[in-house]
């Protein structure tokens, strides 16, 4: 082999190695943004029913104080840019914010109990700037602490209008928790969420997270599907598994946690997070779910 040929082959090999390195870098996991596998800027959004710390648990391992570090380990691993939580009491909200650096949080309790549940939204302050935020009640008086007539539970939705810093795109995130007592209540509650979107969010991308307490193929969502897409059904990589696990107490699991979106170019991944964290097989009675959306 001549010296010129050897140099040529070495140059070609070096060129191929550089291309492989660039390809790996372009697909590496970005903090809080998921893996950019579709070529555009991404937004990782998580929904997580953390199970209220005020609930009485049958097993000691399921008490909030014994699983809270596992919850934070999961959050710190994924670092979602936006995370909507359900059944999150003030003590849980404070603990998560203290143990998961870089997050700010908005939301308020659903009733007058300052330690009660919230449909709070956590966000990475280095990735987004929240321009406006608020909470409304899923009733005919959305600006007041209220509940539907004949209903025991107060139900709220928390929202943020946020600027995605790397793209300068403004979007809305709405997080809620629909009733678990029947579709008559859920249908009315969802109608108030859609009313808010129609009045405030028509010209913006919107992502919604929730414990919807209903399968996403139910007729409850017929009106929503006229304008929104389901991340589970549209993602390039997806997961059709159940999201409610009841701390492993039964096998009749339900798929009731969903991410809906509109105004985004695509969804590259939707997943149900079922792994054990810090030795806890179940970090809540719901599995966290997440979607990677692209602008």
Image: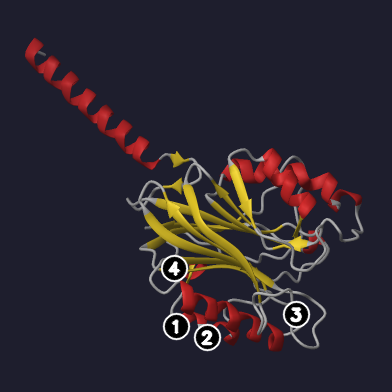
Q: Mark 4 points at which residue?
A: 234
Label whose residue precedes the other's in the sequence (2 or 3) = 3
Q: Name the residue under label 1.
A: 226
Q: Residue at x 76, y 74 (%)?
A: 154
Label whose residue precedes the other's in the sequence (4 or 3) = 3
CA neighbours of label 4 inside 10 A, class few (<14), some (14 to 19), many (20+): some
- Tell me if label 2 and label 1 are in contact, CB under 8 Å: yes
Mark nearer the viewer, 4 or 2: 2
Distance between mark 4 and mark 1 Cα atoms: 15 Å
Q: Which residue is drawn at 87% across and 61% down?
A: 55
Q: Which residue is drawn at 92% across and 59% down?
A: 58
Residue sitting nearer the eye, 290 or 145: 145
Q: Is residue 177 above or below residue 5?
A: below
The numbered mark at residue 147 is: 3
- Tell me if label 1 and label 3 are in contact, CB under 8 Å: no
CA neighbours of label 1 inside 10 A, class few (<14), some (14 to 19), many (20+): few
> Is 55 on the left-hand or right-hand side of 170?
right
- Quadrant that contains the N terminus: top left
Image location of residue 228, percent across then percent down: 46, 75
Residue sitting nearer the eye, 286 or 276: 286
């Amino acid at each position: 082999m001549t010296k010129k040929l050897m140099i040529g082959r070495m140059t070609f090999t070096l060129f191929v190695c550089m291309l492989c390195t660039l390809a790996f870098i372009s697909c590496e996991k970005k903090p809080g943004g998921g893996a950019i596998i579709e070529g555009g800027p991404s937004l990782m959004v998580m929904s997580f029913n953390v199970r209220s710390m005020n609930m009485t648990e049958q097993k000691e391992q399921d008490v909030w104080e014994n699983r809270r570090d596992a919850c934070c380990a999961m959050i710190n691993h994924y670092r979602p840019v936006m995370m909507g939580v359900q059944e999150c009491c003030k003590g849980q909200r404070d603990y998560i914010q203290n143990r998961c650096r870089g997050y700010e949080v908005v939301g308020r309790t659903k009733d007058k109990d300052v330690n009660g549940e919230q449909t709070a939204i956590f966000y990475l302050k280095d990735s987004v700037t929240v321009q406006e935020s608020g909470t409304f009640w899923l009733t005919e008086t959305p600006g007041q602490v209220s509940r539907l007539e004949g209903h025991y539970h107060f139900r709220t939705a928390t929202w943020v209008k946020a600027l995605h810093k790397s793209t300068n795109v403004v979007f809305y995130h709405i997080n809620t928790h629909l009733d678990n007592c029947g579709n008559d209540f859920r249908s009315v509650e969802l109608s108030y969420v859609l009313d808010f979107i129609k009045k405030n969010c028509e010209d913006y991308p919107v992502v919604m997270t929730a414990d919807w307490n209903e399968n996403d193929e139910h007729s409850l969502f017929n009106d929503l599907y006229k304008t929104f897409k389901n991340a589970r059904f549209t993602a390039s990589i997806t997961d059709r598994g159940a999201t409610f696990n009841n701390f492993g107490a039964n096998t009749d699991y339900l798929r009731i946690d969903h991410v809906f979106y509109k105004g985004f170019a695509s969804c590259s991944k939707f997943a149900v997070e079922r792994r054990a964290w810090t030795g806890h097989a179940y970090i809540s009675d719901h599995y966290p779910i997440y979607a990677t959306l692209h602008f």
